[in-house]
Amino acid sequence: MVSELILLTILECVLIALVAAIGHIVNARVIRSFSHHSWLGNFILDSVVGTLTLVTVVAICVTKCATIFVLAPFIIVLLARVNNANYYDREGWKTYIRPANVLVLLSLCIASMAFSVLFDLPASIDNDVLFYANISHALMDGGQENLFHYYNNFDDKFHGTAPYHYLELWMASVVQWLSSGISNMLVLKYVIYSFFKFYLFVGFASIISFYRELKFVDYLIIVGILLVPIEELLNTTSVGYPMFFSPLLRPNLLPYLFIFLPSLLAFHQNSPVVALMWLLFLPVISIATALAVIPSIVLLAFIGYYLGWFEKHKAIVLGSSSLVLAGLMALFYKITGTSVSLMIPFTAQDVLQKFVSIYKAIIGISIVNGGLFIGLLAAACYLMYTLVRVNRSVYQQLFFVGGTLFLCGFGAFQCLTFVENTYQFPYVAYSFLFLLVSVLVLIVAREAITKIVVLTFLIACTVVYREQLPVSGQLENAASLVEYNLSRRGIEQEDVKFLEKNKTRIVNGVFDYSLAQIRHVTPASRQFLTMPFSNYLGYLNGGVQLYPVVPEEIVYDTVGWRGHSYDKAINFNSQLEFYSGEYNPADFAMKLNASFVIRAGQIDGADYSCERFSIKFLDE
């Protein structure tokens, strides 16, 4: 396992160096953005620009322009036009390779990898990441920016674009293509997410360097902040929607923080127009941010002009750019969108029930957590008072941005509660506020006694909520990362050995199961055929294709249960000729030119793990 981790860390370092180099060239010749206060600020700006440039070029080339990143050059041109910088040090990259600076970056890179290894993803998020890994592999393999991964190769009807979060998925596909042999799941989980955590470390350090010289204890506080399971602190009951915004629990939020970093730097450079223009990248990298970010920027254009942040013509440029971007995104998906929908239909009764449940949750949280909220509010007021006193104009702007993002995101959620996953709309605001509060804590911790108090508080929170931390277990008993991850999903060790031994043969197969085998699995889980049981095989190889050959009465249950999941699943499943059980697994495996047939054993829960399974290779 040690050799694997060294290889993955080297891949992360190569990726960091690559995007920094690309970004430096683009910054020097196009955007001309820079940070005059520290080399860390320049490094962040170069890296974010380089990452967006790399992904944009690759996505446009692979999809033949059928990618949402085709709009990224539009934002880059806007940034170049509104940027106040008239000088960029083209030789500044030499500071990156000074021995002391290289040592700092390498240490933070190793720390980010350690975070990914020592603090694993919760089981439910791990299932989502397996789904992301399938999409990531299909992006480079099939050139279709949608959610149907290898089904795009099965039938042209699945072709077309669908809105999602593609930045980290394109990055994983590039790294996997360059590394050749490492599965997308391992790349995404241990290289790409570590990459973003690395820049979170660098970003915190860069902002703090505006106020004082960095000390080793500041890095300890950064680690402490990231270890506190903040969502558990805020959600001590189960009566409301959980506000997940910890980078350890919701890694798909890390790209939000990545884009926020150059925006924070621009605010500190007294360039609010540039800072807000950076936020326009958020709807491009993740559609879940669109209804929070675009209205927020339009509102902030008016607020900024009224409060004297910038001139009238800049406010007009900022507001109109946001609206134009929204129109271009809508036009793009109208022209290139896939004809297969995964939307869940709803009724007036559904809408009413959602509203009632949400407001009951809000009332319940207010009653049960009243004391906690008062304490947190008092702490927040103290932080705000301290930092407004330190740098009034910057933090006035940042509080307006965070508040506006929250109001727009939460407002969009409240208006669309009946649409699946809209509870994620405020997440972009939670991420921004998480970053802002973390920076505030670091800035307040200036004196030695304050540092001790802050560290003590962070350690106490970590101890109290340690059971909620996704700490990796039994790493020392695993010979490889694949073995560790498969064992964690309930696969017996002898089966893990068998899978690893035969992983080169596990490429394209079919699977089936009986109602008795999945009796305890919720209908909603068994119906989601785009993320099937046995998808853990994705840890072995990139792009393992598993087609279900399951009778319709098993997929949809025999007790007549119908719900939103049924209505959602049928839109996709009805496009498949084999889920109805018209073929037996062996016959359909031959039709698909599959290499194996997998039959699941007893499946005990909705976590897609099974105690036993059997695989029959068709060449035997």
Image (tube, rainbow, N blue to C red):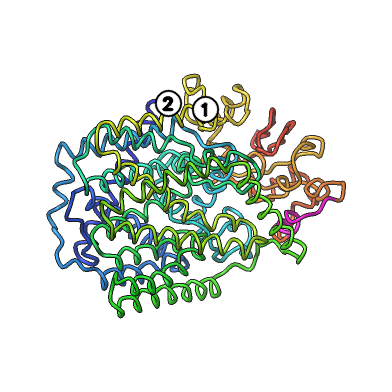
Position of 246 with respect to 19 (left or right) is right
Q: Which amino acid does label 2 sit on?
A: Met
Above or below — where is 453 with respect to 258? above
Give the mark nearest the N terminus, 2 or 1.
2
The residue that appears at 22% across and 62% down in the rendered structure is 33
Number of labelled discs?
2
Position of 349 with respect to 150 (left or right) is right
Above or below — where is 250 with respect to 224? below
The residue that appears at 22% across and 53% down in the rendered structure is 42
**Where in the figure is residue 300, as x and y percent of width and height?**
39, 69
Q: Name the residue under label 2.
A: 1
- Determine whether the residue tagged by mark 2 lies in a helix, strand or loop: loop
Q: Which amino acid does label 1 sit on?
A: Tyr
- Image quarter where the N terminus lies is top left
Please say if the residues under marks 2 and 1 sit with CB atoms less than 8 Å apart: yes
Point out which mark residue 484 bears: 1
Q: Distance between the residues labelled 2 and 1?
A: 9 Å
- In the rendered image, is residue 479 in sight? yes
Q: Nearer the viewer, residue 276 or 55?
A: 276
- In the rendered image, is residue 576 in sight? no
* Residue farthest to the top, as pictured: 477
Q: Nearer the viewer, residue 355 or 134?
A: 355
* Mark 2 neighbour class, 10 Å CA radius: few under 14, some 14 to 19, many 20 or more: some
- Determine whether the residue tagged by mark 1 lies in a helix, strand or loop: helix
The residue that appears at 53% across and 71% down in the rendered structure is 333
Q: What stretch is highlighted in magenta?
A: 561-570
**Where in the figure is residue 434, as x and y percent of width and height?**
42, 48
**Where in the figure is residue 529, as x and y percent of width and height?**
68, 50
